[in-house]
Image (tube, grey):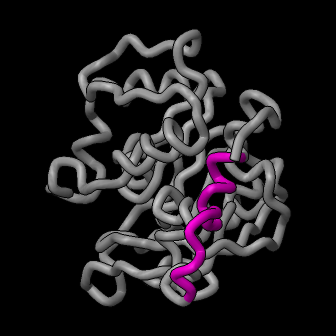
C-alpha cells in the first residue's frame, strides 16, 4: 500500500492520499484516479477481497468507476474489484497451493490505448513485474471468456504462468476500459534497485524498472506528458 503512495508521491511527483475505508463521499472533483492496493485485506477471511468489497468506500469507488474515473486494482485490489462486480471473474488458490512470490513476465495483449494504465505501451510489449499472492489463480467460465476476448478485456497474459490462471490471464479491464485489475505488483518494479537487473549489476543506482510505465501511462492520460520520470 505504501509502495504505491511512494511511487505516486515521490517518483511521479503528483498529489496522492490515503482514503479511509469508511468514507462514502468521494467525488471526481477531488480525485482524478483511484488505486486499490494489495495487502490481504481483512486477512483474506472467507475468500480474498470479499469482505473489503463491502467496505463503505467501495460503494463510492463503484459509482466513480461507472462514471468513467480510472481505477486500478493491484493484487488484492484486483480481487476486491472482482468481488465488487466491477470486473468479471473469480480467484482461486494457486495451483501450487502455496504463497507465490517471484518475478514474472507479462505481455500486453491489447492496444496500449485500451486503458489509461497502458497508454504508453504497445501491443505485444513485455514487462518484468513480481507477483506475491496465494489466491492469484484467475478463472472465468468459457462464455464469459469468449465475451471478454471479443471485447478485448484481457489486458495482460503471463508468459510464465505463476499460479495456474486460466489462459495465462494476469490482468483484465472492464468493457469501458477505465477499470484495470492486475495481479503483479508494478509498484515493486518501479525503481531499478528493486529489480533483478540490480541484483546482477549493483552499479545500477539510478533508473527505473518496467513497473513505472503503468504509472507514467496514467499520468500521461490525466495530465499529458508534462515533466515526469
- 128 or 57: nearer the eye? 128
Give the residue displayed 30% in from the left and 51% down from the top: 49
Residue drawn at (35%, 46%) of the image: 2
Q: Nearer the viewer, residue 11 or 205?
A: 205
Query: How many badges with numbers are in the image?
Result: 0
Residue 182 placed where, x, y %?
53, 59
Quarter holding residue 190: bottom right
Q: Is residue 19 above or below residue 228?
A: above
Whole-percent x, y for residue 15 in the image: 52, 26
- Residue 19 as seen in the image, left or right of residue 63: left
What segment carries the magenta color?
Answer: 201-216
Query: What residue appears at the point 68 percent right and 61 percent down from the top-left corner?
Result: 155
Q: Magenta segment: does it hold 137?
A: no
Q: Is residue 208 magenta?
A: yes
Q: Residue at x 61, y 27 (%)?
A: 69
On screen, residue 115 above or below 202: above
Q: Up-down: is 30 above or below 89?
A: above
Is residue 215 or residue 95 the one in the foreground? 215
Image x and y of residue 102, in percent: 42, 81
Instruction: Give coordinates of residue 118: x percent, y percent.
Output: 73, 52
User: From the viewer's perspective, is 196 left or right of 148?
Assistant: left
Report whether 20 appears left or right of 124: left
Query: Which image quadrant for residue 153?
Result: bottom right
From this viewpoint, is residue 167 visible?
Answer: no
Amino acid at each position: 500500500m505504501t509502495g504505491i503512495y511512494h511511487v505516486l508521491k515521490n517518483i511521479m511527483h503528483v498529489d496522492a492520499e490515503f482514503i479511509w475505508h469508511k468514507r462514502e463521499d468521494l467525488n471526481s472533483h477531488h480525485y482524478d484516479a483511484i488505486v486499490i492496493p494489495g495487502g490481504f485485506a481483512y486477512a483474506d477471511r472467507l475468500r480474498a477481497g470479499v469482505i473489503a468489497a463491502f467496505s463503505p468506500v467501495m460503494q463510492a469507488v463503484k459509482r466513480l468507476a461507472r462514471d468513467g474515473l480510472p481505477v486500478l486494482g493491484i493484487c488484492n485490489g484486483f480481487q476486491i474489484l472482482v468481488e465488487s462486480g466491477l470486473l468479471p471473474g473469480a480467484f482461486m488458490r494457486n495451483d501450487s497451493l502455496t504463497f507465490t512470490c517471484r518475478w514474472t513476465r507479462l505481455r500486453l495483449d491489447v492496444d496500449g490505448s485500451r486503458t489509461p494504465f497502458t497508454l504508453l505501451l504497445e501491443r505485444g510489449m513485455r514487462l518484468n513485474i513480481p507477483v506475491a499472492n496465494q489466491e492469484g489463480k484467475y478463472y472465468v467460465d468459457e462464455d464469459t471468456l469468449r465475451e471478454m476476448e471479443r471485447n478485448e478485456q484481457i489486458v495482460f497474459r503471463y508468459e510464465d504462468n505463476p499460479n495456474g490462471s486460466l489462459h495465462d490471464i494476469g490482468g483484465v479491464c472492464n468493457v469501458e476500459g477505465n477499470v484495470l485489475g492486475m495481479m503483479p505488483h508494478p509498484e515493486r518494479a518501479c525503481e531499478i534497485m528493486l529489480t533483478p537487473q540490480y541484483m546482477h549489476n549493483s552499479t545500477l543506482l539510478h533508473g527505473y524498472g518496467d513497473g513505472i510505465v503503468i504509472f507514467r501511462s496514467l499520468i500521461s492520460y490525466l495530465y499529458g506528458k508534462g515533466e515526469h520520470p
